Amino acid sequence: MIRRHQASDIDEIIALEREVLDTSLDRKIFELALTSELAYYYVYEEDNKILGYISSMFDGEIIEILNFCVKKEYQNKHIGTKLFSQVLKELYSKGAKSVILEVRESNLNAINFYKRFGLKKISVRKNYYKNGENALVLQKVFIDKDEIEREYLKCFCKIKDEKNYIKYSDDIQKDKYCHNFYFIKDESKLDKLLFKIEKDNDKEFLEIDSKSKLNLPEFEEDEEIRMYSPISLIKEDYRLGEVKVLEIDNKNDYYQVEYKTSVIYGESYAKSNALRLTDELIKNDDLIGFVIYNNDIPVGTVHAFKYKECAKIEGFVVLDEYQKKGYGISLFSYVVKYLKSIGIYDLYLTADNLDTPKEIYYKLGFDLLDYNYNYHKDL
């Protein structure tokens, strides 16, 4: 279990630091951290024993890692990954723009560990440690969580940025709600803004998105959650089936799964949606499709949008008759392994807050970033 540190932990944390690091923060620092709004200290506890610990300071933009250690006999058991990920996930959701730390130049294991999270050397501090050893300064700059969402939508939509809202429109799939909507930036004058949007809208429906709940009683409301995890935290659990990256020769397999999962919205929509998505995945180098098979039968699909050193996971589906059999986790594991191999360090996805898949994502290691509210009205 990972939790924030308590006063009763201080003696055990100091002993752990001295055992692993041969040094420790001052007791007063631990005591002050208990009430400081800037301090984020965590322990990893099992059977009432502290096996690992990490301390960090966060000023609203930069995470500074102070000390970080795991008991020697418990190292290489994923504890350090869980602790470090906890800091990144919680503070990124609070607005962190970067993380920075120092590490001994000779500590290759630690350096390689941090590299798996996307930290890179930005400078060297000469004679930083008491024995005269240099410290490497490592840094990770986070991608803005709204930036990757916007860049993904650019693959399908035209984007028009107005003063109080953003208009997304898809000239090819004009009937796809999530490609044709208005995102509200400022809802302070909602009535006037809504009048302007309705006048501008040329669809047979009106779709509005917002980070805040809106008072729109005439609209149907859905709640989505955006989630994030460092890719190193996701344990691979490949169980069955064969996964292939989408290419020209298996284009029809991807199409079949997409068609079958969207036919509930109508035959015409299912065909156009499956064809559009499949074609876009093949021609756009930033989009990667994956298909999982039971023998030679395609039973699930997912795609990833890679942007800089992160990726957004979208369209994760397994046909009904193959659900709860391990195909979903196998497909996800393959995607994680593939994305790691091409230098991806962070994963994002969106889930319906009322659906069960979000519970799977939580178990995999994803945490909540923020909410998104969808409002729909047929005209």
Image (cartoon, rainbow, N blue to C red):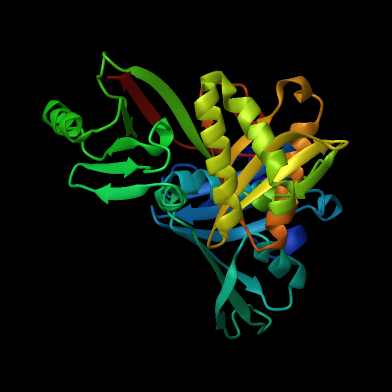
**Taking the image as drawn, is residue 327 in sight?**
yes
Instruction: Residue at 39% x, 47% y: name it.
Output: 157
**Taking the image as drawn, is residue 364 in sight?**
no
The answer to whether residue 107 is above or below residue 39 is: below
| The image quarter in which residue 72 lies | bottom right
Name the side, left or right, on which 379 lies relative to 20.
left
Instruction: Residue at 66% x, 51% y: name it.
Output: 231
Instruction: Residue at 19% x, 29% y: name it.
Output: 198
Specify the farthest residue to the left.
192
Name the side, left or right, on which 316 lies relative to 201.
right
- Image quadrant occupied by the N terminus: top right
The answer to whether residue 173 is above or below residue 345 is: above
Name the side, left or right, on which 50 lies relative to 55.
right
The answer to whether residue 334 is above or below residue 363 is: below
| The image quarter in which residue 43 lies | top right
Name the side, left or right, on which 29 lies relative to 298.
left
Instruction: Residue at 51% x, 47% y: name it.
Output: 40
Q: Position of residue 77 (x, y in %)?
A: 82, 49
- Image quadrant occupied by the C terminus: top left
Q: Position of residue 156 (x, y in %)?
A: 44, 47
Nearer-the-camera pick, 279 or 31: 279
Nearer-the-camera pick, 355 or 18: 355
Nearer-the-camera pick, 114 or 182: 182
Nearer-the-camera pick, 121 or 275: 275
Q: Position of residue 17 (x, y in %)?
A: 70, 57
Specify the farthest residue to the top.
217
